[in-house]
């Protein structure tokens, strides 16, 4: 008999900004919703984020950025995931994005972008409906 | 003889009638109940329906409230306040290249701004040059890129540095950027003793909230003391630190937490300077503060009044300061970025106006008003002009600057001021027991207190207990808005310019200067090893910001975010 393991989520902050209020609130909300949550802290390079995601064997990466550098870091993270054969990890983003950047970020594989004012319950619901564990552990 | 404001017999009569009124109130509620189950400030501090002399009956006018410009400064730090000189209208500005930001400075000055405030981009804030791999995609996005003394020269071109005061939001690399400012001013023929301005230089709140992290706490404090010591001797009109609650609040703290942690950071800096052998009355007059003005009107006014009284008492009683100037909590205020919404962005003008009004009634020395589009991006010229005009309308049309501290004596405002001070003092006692702020930061204490408040507020927004128009009441979509665009091409140009600059330097002079900086960093902290003279020589010799910060990182080690949540 196999049992579905808890979803493992990495909340990551690429870029040099220290605006971590949102990231830490999301991390807590997802933990309170029953997911396993790992938080990278601020100032992570795309390389560090992808490495942590693989090491921690996560199912979902939530990227939080408010510096405006998403057009560099988000595509770079997607590229590195692909290079490492980990592009089955779902990636979502949150923070401040000019509206016209959002379709471009989705084009490179970011599944969803959450903008200011999004309810925590909507994010949790989205995760429940759209993310499945990558592997099923044998019980 | 005390100066209590109400006689005992008056209090007795008021108390009696208050009880009668309370009964009538309860009776009236049976017909029409209160709108809310619980009335509280944005910081979740519960407030009563009515305040009366009973709430301030123990207050002594001269001891607790007093006169403007006199201890304990509850009513303001200057004797004349805005009757003689308005607050400085100081808009935080920085975008793209130094030339673009210089253009913005001139635009703001031409529209009546009275002081400058520089926003640097993230690589500059973190001590990296634009060509660092860590800086990719960040150049000029959230502020201006400054790598070299030439960037500094371009930034202030055409501005008289002895007439205009400049505030610079820069923290771990504050000493380096300040050295560039002084060196550039001297190259332009100005006298460092006549330069006026502020460097934020508050490393403790970086660990607590803003997370611009570079060095561990101990060496960070050493550099702060170096700058205070140097300013005291060489740049006497400069505020060498702006002890900041702003970012603590933006990270989700309550008003009391903002007040308490910031004042305690101030205590820590004073202790460190005293340990270095500086005399309190020699440097304390150049310590300045920076507060947030959030959306809850009276809470903010009370917080600002309490901050002045709290700091004055601490400086006098805890540190034995003698000069009144040493006891003054002089401060800049910025309206709360976190109170703004991307939804229906024009509503942000109303929020900012209210917050600016609270800052003025709270007696600020300088003020930044956020632009309506600051939720999206660095403000456009259109939006920043409205934000500046907001201050000018409040200053010249509304009449709030005509009378000093007009809310003093309000039963509610005085009672709330007392409560702010009392609750902040509880935190201060707790931090003392923990062994001080550095020990508390290492235990993640202030960080988690703030995270708890931020999470609680978010839950209150989600369950409708706290209302934000456009978000959870009359919810609305984020509209497209004409916003400022930063050309990604400037990153390449800035790197090219940096490389050309590096080519032109005298390598021998540069190496010698950087070696001297390293020698001073490695030596014990004292005037002979103060980093500032070495930094000024280094940046004149062409050292880039990162080259100086790399010396720091190599000697002192680095610090990264403990990632608690």
Image (cartoon, rainbow, N blue to C red):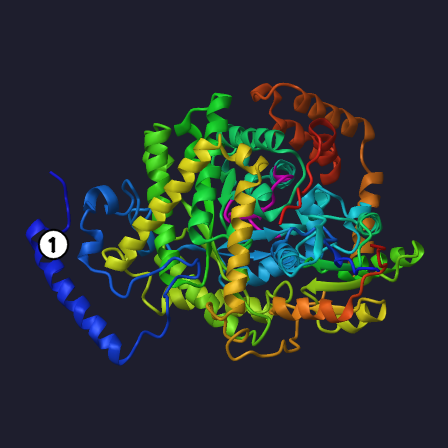
Q: Which residues are magenta?
A: B158-174
Is A97 displayed left or right of B297 in the figure? right
Q: Is residue B489 visible?
A: no
Q: Position of residue B352 (x, y in %)?
A: 47, 66
The answer to whether residue B217 is visible is: yes
Residue located 74% across and 53% down the image: A14
The answer to whether B98 is drawn above or below residue B198 in the figure is: below
Q: Residue at x 71, y 40 (%)?
A: B545
Q: Nearer the viewer, residue B14 or B195?
A: B14
The quadrant the N terminus of chain A occupies is bottom right
Q: Is residue B134 magenta?
A: no
Structural crowding at the residue carrying mark 1, measured as other residues with C-alpha within 10 Å and reported as few (<14), some (14–19) or many (≥20):
some
Residue B370 vertical position relative to residue B28 in the rendered view, above or below:
above
In this view, the residue farthest toward the left is B9
Residue B184 in picture, x, y percent from top left: 64, 40
Where residue A22 sits, quadrant-wise, is bottom right
For residue A51, side relative to residue A116 (left or right) = right
Q: In terms of secondary structure, where does tag 1 sit?
A: helix
Would you say B271 lies left or right of B531 here?
left
Name the quadrant of the C terminus of chain A: bottom right
Q: Is residue B165 magenta?
A: yes
Q: Position of residue B67 (x, y in %)?
A: 24, 46
Tell me where residue A122 sits by quadrant: bottom right
Residue in the image at 19% along x and 67% along y: B22
Q: Is residue A31 above or below residue B225?
A: below
Q: Position of residue B447 (x, y in %)?
A: 56, 45
- Answer left or right for B486 relative to B163: right
| Residue matched to label 1 | B11
């Amino acid at each position: 008999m196999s049992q579905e393991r808890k979803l493992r989520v990495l909340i990551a902050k690429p870029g040099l900004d220290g605006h971590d209020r949102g990231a830490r609130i999301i991390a807590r909300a997802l933990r309170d919703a029953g997911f396993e949550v790992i938080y990278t802290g601020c100032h992570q390079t795309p390389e560090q984020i992808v490495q942590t995601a693989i090491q921690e064997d996560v199912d979902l990466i939530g990227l939080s950025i408010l510096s405006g550098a998403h057009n560099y870091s988000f595509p770079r993270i997607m590229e590195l995931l692909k290079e490492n054969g980990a592009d089955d990890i779902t990636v979502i983003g949150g923070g401040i994005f000019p509206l016209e950047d959002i379709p471009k970020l989705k084009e490179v594989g970011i599944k969803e972008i959450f903008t200011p004012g999004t309810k925590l319950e909507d994010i949790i619901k989205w995760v429940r409906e759209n993310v499945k564990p990558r592997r099923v552990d044998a019980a | 003889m005390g100066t209590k404001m109400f006689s005992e017999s008056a209090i007795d009569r008021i108390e009696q009638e208050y009880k009668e009124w309370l009964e009538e109130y309860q009776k009236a509620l049976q017909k029409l109940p209160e709108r809310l189950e619980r009335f509280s400030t944005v910081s979740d501090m519960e407030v009563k329906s009515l305040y009366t002399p009973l709430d301030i009956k123990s207050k002594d006018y001269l001891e607790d409230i007093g006169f403007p410009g006199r201890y304990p400064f509850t009513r303001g730090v200057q004797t004349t306040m805005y009757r003689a000189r308005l607050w400085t209208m100081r808009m935080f500005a920085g975008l793209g290249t130094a030339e673009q930001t210089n253009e913005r400075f001139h635009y703001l000055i031409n529209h009546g701004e009275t002081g400058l405030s520089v926003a640097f981009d993230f690589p500059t804030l973190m001590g990296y040059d634009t060509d660092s791999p860590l800086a990719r995609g960040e150049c000029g996005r959230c502020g201006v890129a400054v790598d070299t003394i030439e960037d500094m020269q371009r930034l202030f071109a055409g501005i008289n540095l002895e007439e205009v005061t400049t505030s610079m939001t820069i923290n771990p690399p504050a000493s380096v950027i300040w050295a560039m400012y002084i060196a550039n001013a001297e190259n332009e023929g100005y006298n460092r003793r006549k330069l006026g301005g502020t460097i934020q230089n508050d490393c403790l709140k970086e660990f607590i909230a803003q997370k611009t992290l570079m060095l561990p706490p101990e060496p960070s404090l050493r550099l702060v003391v170096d700058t205070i010591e140097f300013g005291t001797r060489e740049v006497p009109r400069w505020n060498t630190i702006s002890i900041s609650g702003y970012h603590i609040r933006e990270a989700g703290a309550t008003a009391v937490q903002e007040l308490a942690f910031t004042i305690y950071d101030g205590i820590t800096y004073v202790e460190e300077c005293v340990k270095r052998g500086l005399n309190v009355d020699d440097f304390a007059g150049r310590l300045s503060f920076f507060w947030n003005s959030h959306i809850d009107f009276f809470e903010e006014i009370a917080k600002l009044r309490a901050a002045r009284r709290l700091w004055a008492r601490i400086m006098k009683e805890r540190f034995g300061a003698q000069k009144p100037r040493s006891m003054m909590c002089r401060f800049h205020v910025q309206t709360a970025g976190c109170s703004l919404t991307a939804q229906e962005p024009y509503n942000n003008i109303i929020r900012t106006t209210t917050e600016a009004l609270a800052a003025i009634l709270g007696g600020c020395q300088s003020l930044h008003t956020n632009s309506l589009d600051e939720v999206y991006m660095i403000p456009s010229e259109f939006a920043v002009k409205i934000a500046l005009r907001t201050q000018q309308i409040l200053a010249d049309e509304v009449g709030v600057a005509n009378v000093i501290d007009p809310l003093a004596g309000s039963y509610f405002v005085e009672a709330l001021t007392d409560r702010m001070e009392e609750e902040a003092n509880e935190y201060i006692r707790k931090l003392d027991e923990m062994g001080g702020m550095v020990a508390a930061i290492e235990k993640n204490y202030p960080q988690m207190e703030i995270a708890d408040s931020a999470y609680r507020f978010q839950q209150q927004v989600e369950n409708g207990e706290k209302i934000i128009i456009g978000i959870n009441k009359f919810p609305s979509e984020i509209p497209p808005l004409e916003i400022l665009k930063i050309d990604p091409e400037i990153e390449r140009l800035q790197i090219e310019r940096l490389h050309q600059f590096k080519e032109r330097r005298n390598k021998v002079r540069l190496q010698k200067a950087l070696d001297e900086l390293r020698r001073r960093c490695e030596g014990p902290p004292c005037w002979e090893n103060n980093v500032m003279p070495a930094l000024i020589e280094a940046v004149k010799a062409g050292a880039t910001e990162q080259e100086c910060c790399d010396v720091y990182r190599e000697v002192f080690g680095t610090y990264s975010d403990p990632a608690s949540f």
